[in-house]
Image (cartoon, rainbow, N blue to C red):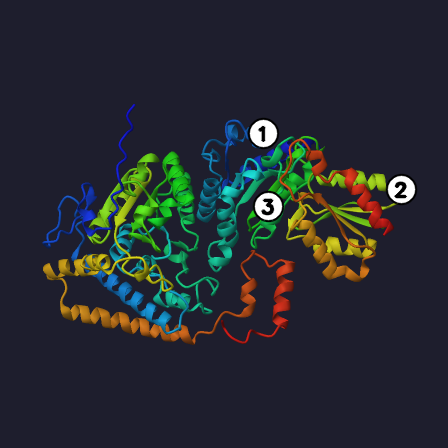
């Protein structure tokens, strides 16, 4: 009896992984593009996506400083993953829906969520879309078809399958993209979600941001599979691996997935190979578990710098444009932060609202009791 | 009015609501062609088809997770968990997600499901086909918890649950699925949530029960009467939010309380009911409130009748309370 050879895991988090066979990569190092997968975006599309990526990066930087200054409690960002997030959000159609993880504020803003609402969430103030009930970066934006964010990992995956399944049952041409990280592929809801999606052929786009790390746990500790994409095969779901730092590759992969959903051919699992350049969140110090040279290698593949080189090569972007875009983003942020900081906190009584559609007797009693109590002396 | 058992009444309620509201879908393990392992969904597949009566893969987390997504899209899913004992793979989706959706989204995304699931023992089901996990869901803000005791209430409470804007855990006491029979109106009616029923009036001891144990409480109350003790028996019907306006006046009248439930004693719902009584009617009490419950052990197979709080254990509690 011979045992089948076990294929060793290939997760090196080496930036050259994107050169592996089968990985969609459009923007080559020499500045040219692969015509096979080029989504042929217009000049204005490229410029507006690039501008959005710059804005998201500046926001991330600013929010980290606000947290360090003690002005907000927390931030969980997307530094290094902007092409994966913006490219996929761009490729979704207006009526499509987004079920986010917690790093996709770039997608919410791209869809049209007001910056002020996002910043209000960072401060948990009275104008926060979730009324100060959740940690920062757990906003909601239903008006732009953007779902509700929770902290348990992967739960949104099964929900997105049910949501897109309902759209299919109703006969609506609506696809749903669901974001998650490489760590979530170990969670129950990833497997049950893909299984239901495969069985019922739901129009779901599973978008795995393989950013190399789940807090301190590297990809080779999440799986012995040679890729995250290949997990789709077990569930009868076609997979695509793409260079997640290549905006055009991400757009191309996501468009293919949306087209499959729209044709009624079911779901797609996309693995976008990217890298979390920052810590997991402002509560994390990655120096404790990873080498700086690994980070440096990925910094050289920074998705924003790569797209800027393409724009520059095509004569679409100048240093002056960069200065103007950064200045506009900084000014907009400054104003939004000033407004958010001046906005009062949610009233105490709001703690008891929205638990149920109508407030039951026991919550009315508890609210009345709390109103009689002295307020806490310090905020924390 | 026709006679129905619990299974028939719940089936009748589901059919009525699926005819009335095209958004209602039934989903779960074996609910389709075979009509459920207890036949509660029998015939629905034939009438409403595969898109509305859905046999799912065997994954409780997947059933509830996808049902939440369907609800967010605008459907009204009524998923079945085949036995409440198997609900725990879906616990995260129910407690972390379903219960909190309205709150955590600032009211933008209310997620509404009615999760039907058989509960309770006395059917030779052992550890994993007998449990009564109501208190863990009562302890999760955002959920409503219902447990009917008779066919009329089962249909009316189910229709009220489906039309209620909040997520509901609908616990069906399987020991009386076929044993509890009664007249059930064929038409559309609801039994309001959070309203208990006084099923026996009395002046000396308030006995609070629900589900299958209601019949044990009534039997014990009848036996107590022969000893000259008049019991008032309350069927809570909705466990949470509980009908405090039914409990407090009864206790103020009798001054004596016995709470009965199948679930383990410690942190069972009986403890919460007694705490509420202490807070709201302490000066009216003539005796310490008493719990007659299951034990703090896993649910046993061979000795299940010793485990269950049947009439033979409720009666002495009533007598001791009355004579305290």
Label for residue B227? Answer: 2
Disc 3 vs disc 2: which is toward the camera? 2
Disc 1 vs disc 3: which is toward the camera? 1
In the picture, residue A327 is in which quadrant? Answer: bottom left
Residue at the location (26% across, 53% down)? Answer: A84
Contact? badges 1 and 3 (CB < 8 Å):
no
Q: Residues within 10 Å of mark 3 (few under 14, many from 20)?
A: many
The mark total stands at 3
Q: Is residue A292 above or below residue A380?
A: above
Q: Is residue B192 visible?
A: no
Label for residue A53? Answer: none
Mark before the other along the chain sequence, 3 or 2: 3
Contact? badges 3 and 2 (CB < 8 Å):
no
Residue B250: x and y, percent? 78, 53
In the picture, residue A49 is in which quadrant? Answer: bottom left
Q: Give me the chain letter of mark 1.
A: B
Q: Residue tagged by mark 3? A: B161
Tell me the distance, in whole angstroms, between the alpha carbons under discs 1 and 2. 42 Å
Q: Residues within 10 Å of mark 2 (few under 14, many from 20)?
A: few
Tell me the distance, in whole angstroms, between the alpha carbons under discs 1 and 3. 20 Å
Q: For mark 2, give the secondary structure.
A: loop
Q: Residue tagged by mark 1? A: B39
Q: Give me the chain letter of mark 3.
A: B
Left or right: residue B99 compared with residue B254: left
Relative to the observer, which residue lies in front, B144 or B269?
B269
Residue B244: x and y, percent? 70, 55
Tell me the distance, in whole angstroms, between the alpha carbons under discs 3 and 2. 40 Å
Q: Is residue B160 above or below residue A110?
A: above
């Amino acid at each position: 009896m011979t045992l089948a050879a076990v294929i060793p895991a290939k997760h090196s988090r080496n930036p050259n992984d994107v050169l592996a066979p089968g990985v969609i990569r459009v923007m080559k190092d020499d500045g040219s593009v692969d015509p096979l997968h080029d989504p042929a975006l217009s000049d204005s599309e490229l410029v507006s996506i690039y501008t959005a990526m710059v804005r998201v990066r500046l926001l991330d930087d600013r929010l980290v400083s606000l947290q360090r200054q003690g002005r907000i409690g927390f931030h969980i960002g997307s530094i290094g993953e902007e092409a994966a997030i913006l490219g996929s959000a761009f490729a979704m159609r207006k009526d499509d829906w987004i079920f986010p993880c917690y790093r996709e504020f770039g997608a919410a803003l791209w869809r049209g969520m007001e910056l002020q609402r996002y910043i209000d969430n960072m401060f948990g103030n009275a104008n926060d879309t979730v009324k100060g009930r959740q940690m920062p970066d757990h906003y909601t934006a239903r008006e732009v078809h953007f779902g509700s964010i929770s902290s348990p990992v992967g739960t949104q995956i099964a929900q997105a399958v049910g949501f897109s399944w309902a759209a299919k049952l109703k006969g609506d041409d609506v696809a749903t993209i669901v974001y998650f990280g490489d760590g979530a592929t170990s969670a129950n809801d990833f497997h049950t979600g893909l299984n239901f999606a495969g069985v019922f052929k739901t129009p779901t786009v599973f978008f795995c941001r393989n950013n190399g790390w789940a807090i301190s746990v590297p990809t080779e500790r999440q799986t012995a599979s040679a890729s995250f994409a290949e997990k789709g095969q077990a569930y009868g779901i076609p997979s695509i691996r793409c260079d997640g730092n290549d905006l055009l590759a991400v757009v191309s992969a996501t468009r293919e997935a949306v087209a499959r959903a729209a044709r009624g051919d079911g779901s797609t699992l996309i693995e976008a190979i990217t890298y979390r350049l920052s810590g997991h969140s402002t509560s994390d110090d990655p120096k404790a578990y990873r080498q700086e040279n690994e980070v440096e290698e990925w910094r050289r593949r920074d998705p924003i710098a790569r797209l800027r080189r393409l724009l520059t090569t095509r004569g679409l972007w100048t240093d002056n444009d960069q200065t103007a875009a950064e200045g506009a983003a900084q000014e907009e942020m400054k104003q939004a932060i000033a407004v958010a900081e001046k906005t009062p906190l949610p009233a105490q009584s709001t703690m008891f609202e929205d638990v149920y559609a109508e407030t039951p007797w026991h919550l009315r009693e508890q609210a009345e009791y709390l109103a009689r109590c002295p307020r806490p002396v310090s905020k924390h | 009015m026709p006679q129905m058992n619990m299974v028939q009444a719940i089936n009748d309620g589901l059919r009525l609501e699926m005819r009335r509201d095209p958004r209602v879908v039934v989903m779960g393990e074996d609910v389709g062609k075979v009509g459920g392992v207890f036949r509660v969904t029998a015939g629905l597949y034939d009438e409403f088809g595969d898109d509305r009566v859905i046999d799912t893969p065997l994954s409780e987390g997947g059933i509830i997770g996808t049902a939440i997504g369907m609800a967010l899209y605008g459907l009204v899913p009524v998923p079945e968990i085949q036995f409440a004992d198997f609900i725990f793979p879906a616990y995260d989706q129910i407690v972390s997600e379903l219960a909190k959706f309205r709150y955590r989204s600032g009211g933008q995304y209310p997620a509404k499901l009615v999760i039907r699931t058989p509960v309770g023992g006395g059917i030779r089901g052992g550890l994993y086909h007998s449990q009564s996990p109501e208190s863990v869901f009562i302890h999760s803000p955002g959920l409503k918890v219902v447990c009917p005791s008779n066919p009329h209430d089962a249909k009316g409470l189910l229709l009220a649950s489906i039309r209620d804007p909040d997520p509901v855990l609908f616990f069906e006491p399987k020991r009386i699925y076929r044993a509890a029979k009664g007249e059930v109106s064929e038409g559309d009616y609801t039994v309001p949530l959070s309203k208990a029923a006084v099923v026996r009036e009395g002046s000396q001891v308030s006995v609070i029960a629900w589900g299958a144990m209601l019949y044990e409480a009534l039997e014990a109350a009848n036996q107590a009467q022969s000893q000259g003790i008049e019991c008032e028996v309350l069927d809570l019907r909705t466990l949470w939010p509980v009908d405090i306006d039914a409990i407090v006046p009864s206790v103020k009248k009798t001054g004596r309380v016995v709470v009965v439930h199948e679930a383990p004693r410690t942190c069972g719902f009986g403890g919460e009911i007694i705490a509420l009584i202490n807070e709201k009617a302490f000066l009216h009490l003539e005796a310490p409130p008493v719990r007659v419950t299951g034990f703090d052990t896993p649910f046993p197979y061979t000795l299940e009748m010793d485990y269950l709080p049947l009439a033979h254990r409720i009666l002495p509690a009533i007598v001791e309370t009355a004579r305290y």
